[in-house]
Image (spheres, grey):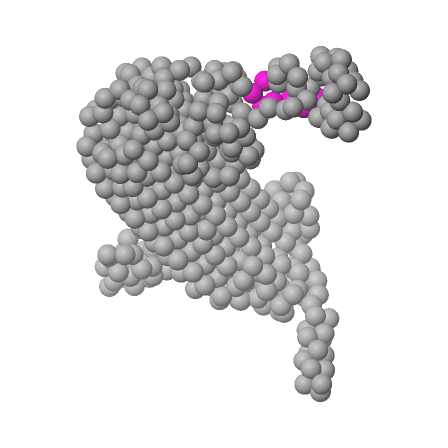
């Protein structure tokens, strides 16, 4: 009892000791001075202004924030500018390198002018190499802070122009706008050890990097107009890095490979419910690039209007095993999906339509030594073949492959229409750029329910609405109160309902009808 009381008093004293520190003030003229004086649980509130600092959280579980992180005007005018570092070798605007947890929070700032910090990074097959990392934010040494509601702009480094996470650093990166950052090879900074020949700035991750056992949670961000000289104009995940990338808008980023998202070296993140749009590269994967024993889940994304010579949507290579399901992959320049072996793929219940041709086009192409399953997809109106396979062993079943410029099937496969459930009919999309299917679509109730494609469709509606799943990303959902099946519960349905009033219907039925009033099908 005595030991318990002592522990309680110590905890209570620590909790009561937490306070609020204001910057600038007589006691704390700078953000770093406030951090150095803080204790765990403190909040440091920073007034609007431009602070030429390169701050280090020093392992403190504290919140450093602007006066109002929810006010865009305050966020835009509360600026940490990292372009005047005391030590040119540590020029990230914000550094977490002392094992910080999610209780270490940076919130509501504009982070700019950072030029990264030198860090020895382990590269598989290459060893420890000096890299210039984390233009705006550097997270290393098992540091997993919360980075939220910031504008991260106009920073650069060799790796991670915006944010760099290394070595079990699982940052929570949420509700930020990350724009106009650069990961460049020739950044102009000299190696801190001139006798060390191992300088290897590859120019990866214009906005965000997760490198080596990092599982960042990247949610609800706008990731735009970033550039990488090599890989991952938007996001680069490498070397056993997983985590979740969800509900982001990733657009107008540029790189050689994986302009939107680049996943490589045995990484298996979840890439879900993102809009990946208008990203441009020249070497593969305008939207997403997957390489070397990586097995990501790519689900419920809109992948559209991306551009690449080879595959505007998704490229995958070298023993990767992705699951690509319930996505809309449309209007990209280059193939919708390109699979280069050896690889094993699951491509399930996607809608792959209207992809254009630059040098190459088409819906799906699988080259030599690709295995796996292509099932329940709508593949239509692409400039090129619908499905083209050369030397691959994929199973192709229950797809709707229709109206593709070069034909439904090409390469070393014959026309599979009418075989294994494959059809070739107009899916009857709801409209231009509306890829929902109506009840009269031939894709409704025409898929293979034995093929696992997740419990929910693109709209988060139940995947098996009828006796069988539908083909494509969308499951057509109807309503029992929509008597004329026109996609809306309105007065016409009310008239039909009242005709049977007190005959086949009762008050309980009327309550259900009232709940469904003005329901509208997504396919209308």
In this view, 267 is above or below 301: below
Q: Residue at x 59, y 64 (%)?
A: 61
Residue at x 49% of width, y 66% of height: 99
Q: Is residue 8 above or below residue 237?
A: below
Residue nearer the viewer, 425 or 122: 425
Quarter of the rendering containing residue 75: top right
Tell me the quadrant of the picture where the C terminus can be found. top right
Q: How many marks?
A: 0
Residue 477 visible, this angle: yes
Secondary structure predominantly adopted by residues drawn in magenta: loop
Looking at the picture, how far across and down is residue 50, in whole percent?
59, 49
- Reply above or below: 497 against 146: above
Q: Position of residue 295 (x, y in %)?
A: 36, 46
Q: Residue at x 36, y 50 (%)?
A: 267
Please give left or right for residue 461 compared with residue 424 in the image.
right
Question: Residue at point 53% right, 58% down?
Answer: 145
In percent of width and height, residue 18 lies at: 69, 68
Q: Does residue 521 belong to the magenta stretch?
A: yes
Q: Is residue 180 left or right of residue 366?
A: right
Q: Is residue 237 magenta?
A: no
Residue 152: x and y, percent? Answer: 52, 45
Farthest residue, direction front: 503
**Foreground residue among 265 and 189:** 265
Looking at this rendering, what residue extends furthest in the bottom direction? 2
Image quarter where the N terminus lies is bottom right
Q: Is residue 284 visible?
A: no
Q: Quadrant of residue 408?
A: top left
Q: What is the span of residues highlighted in magenta in the rendered image?
A: 518-524
Whether residue 499 sits left or right of residue 277 in the image: it is right
């Amino acid at each position: 009892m005595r030991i318990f009381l002592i522990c309680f008093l110590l905890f209570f004293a620590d909790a009561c000791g937490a306070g609020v520190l204001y910057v600038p003030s007589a006691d704390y003229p700078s953000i770093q001075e406030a951090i150095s004086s803080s204790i765990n649980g403190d909040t440091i509130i920073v007034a609007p202004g431009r602070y030429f600092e390169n701050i280090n959280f020093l392992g403190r579980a504290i919140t450093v924030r602007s006066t109002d992180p929810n006010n865009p005007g305050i966020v835009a005018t509360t600026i940490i500018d990292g372009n005047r570092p005391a030590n040119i070798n540590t020029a990230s605007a914000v550094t977490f390198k002392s094992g910080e947890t999610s209780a270490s929070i940076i919130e509501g700032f504009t982070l700019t002018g950072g030029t990264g910090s030198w860090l020895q990074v382990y590269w598989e097959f290459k060893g420890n190499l000096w890299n210039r990392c984390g233009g705006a934010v550097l997270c290393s040494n098992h540091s997993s802070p919360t980075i939220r509601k910031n504008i991260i702009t106009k920073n650069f480094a060799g790796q991670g122009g915006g944010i760099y996470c290394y070595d079990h650093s699982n940052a929570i990166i949420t509700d930020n706008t990350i724009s106009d950052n650069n990961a460049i090879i020739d950044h102009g900074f000299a190696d801190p050890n001139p006798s060390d020949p191992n300088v290897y700035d590859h120019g990866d991750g214009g906005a965000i990097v997760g490198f080596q056992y990092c599982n960042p949670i990247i949610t609800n961000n706008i990731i735009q107009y970033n550039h990488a000289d090599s890989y991952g104009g938007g996001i680069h995940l490498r070397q056993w890095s997983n985590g979740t990338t969800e509900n982001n808008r990733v657009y107008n980023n540029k790189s050689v490979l994986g302009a939107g998202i680049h996943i490589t070296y045995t990484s298996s993140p979840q890439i879900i419910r993102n809009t990946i749009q208008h990203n441009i590269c020249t070497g593969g994967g305008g939207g997403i690039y997957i390489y070397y024993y990586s097995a990501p889940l790519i689900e419920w994304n809109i992948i559209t209007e991306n551009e690449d010579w080879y595959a505007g949507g998704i490229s995958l290579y070298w023993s990767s095993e992705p699951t690509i399901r319930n996505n809309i992959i449309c209007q990209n320049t280059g193939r919708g999906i390109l699979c280069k072996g050896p690889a094993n793929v699951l491509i399930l219940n996607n809608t792959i339509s209207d992809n254009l041709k630059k040098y190459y086009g088409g819906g799906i192409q699988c080259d030599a030594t690709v295995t796996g399953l292509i099932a329940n997809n709508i593949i239509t109106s692409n400039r090129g073949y619908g499905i083209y396979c050369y030397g691959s062993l994929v199973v192709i079943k229950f797809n709707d492959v229709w109206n593709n410029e070069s034909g439904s099937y090409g390469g070393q496969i014959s026309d599979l229409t009418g075989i294994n459930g494959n059809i070739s009919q107009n899916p009857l999309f709801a409209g231009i750029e509306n890829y929902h299917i109506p009840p009269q679509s031939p894709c409704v109730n025409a898929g293979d329910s034995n093929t696992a494609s997740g419990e929910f469709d693109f709209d988060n509606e139940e995947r098996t609405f009828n006796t069988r799943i539908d083909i494509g990303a969308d499951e057509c959902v109807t309503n029992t109160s929509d008597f004329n099946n026109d996609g809306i519960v309105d007065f016409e349905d009310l008239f039909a309902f009242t005709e049977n009033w007190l005959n086949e219907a009762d008050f309980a039925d009327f309550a259900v009808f009232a709940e469904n009033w003005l329901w509208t099908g997504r396919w209308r």
